[in-house]
Amino acid sequence: MNTKKFYKCEAEAFNGSWYDPEHDSPTIEKHDAENLVRAAARFLGIERPRVYFAEVGSTSAYYPGRGQQYIVFLARGLRQSVVLHEVAHAAVDLSPHKDTGDHGPLFIAFYLRLLSRFGHTKQARRLRKLCDAA
């Protein structure tokens, strides 16, 4: 699935906005984001990526690289779903299987598992239906 389609499905799964506080988790602090990255990586059985925080920028992002994977999060407005989304990218990068595109089936599978495991079961179910229909 291409990125634009995936983001549209993701926004709809979270009732209109990926960053909508009414339908997503509340904002979390930096130390909570670090702990969530650690727990999510352990749950998926992958090496924990390094975590950095930026005070300015337009988006959070995962940066691949064997032995030096890292995620840069925007410090303001950080939410669980954003953290889990970026950890899913790390899981794809570290997987022996190949994926198609940035938000392919393998990424979606990892992301759905993380959403379900960390308290976003309703959104995970909606996202699965939306992705299957896209």
Image: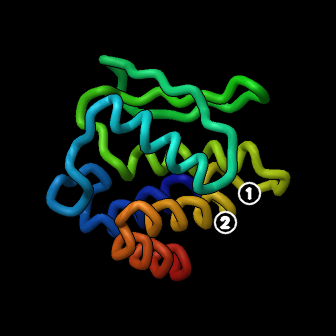
Give the x, y percent position of residue 93: 72, 43
Mark in the foreground, 1 or 2 = 2
Which residue corresponds to the image point at 63% horizontal and 57% vertical from the top-left?
107
> Element type at marker 1?
loop
Mark 1 and 2 residues: CB-CB less than 8 Å, in contact? yes
Pick the front one: 108 or 122 = 122
| Residue placed under numbered mark 2 in the picture | 105
Give the x, y percent position of residue 25: 25, 54
Which residue corresponds to the image point at 40% horizontal and 22% vertical from the top-left?
53
> Element type at marker 2?
helix
Which residue corresponds to the image point at 53% horizontal and 30% vertical from the top-left?
71
Taking 80 as reference, is 96 left or right?
A: right
Hey, which residue is sitting farthest left in the picture? 22
How packed mark 2 is, by other alpha carbons closer than 10 Å (few <14, some 14-19, many 20 or more), is: some
First along the sequence among labels 1 and 2: 1
Is 76 placed above or below 86 here?
A: above
Taking 50 as reference, is 117 left or right?
A: left
Image quarter of residue 90 = top right
Which residue corresponds to the image point at 74% horizontal and 28% vertical from the top-left?
65
Give the x, y percent position of residue 83: 43, 44
Taking 101 as reference, is 6 left or right?
A: left
Q: Amino acid at mark 2?
A: Pro
Q: Amino acid at mark 1?
A: Thr
Q: How many marks?
A: 2
Which quadrant of the rendered structure holds the N terminus? bottom right
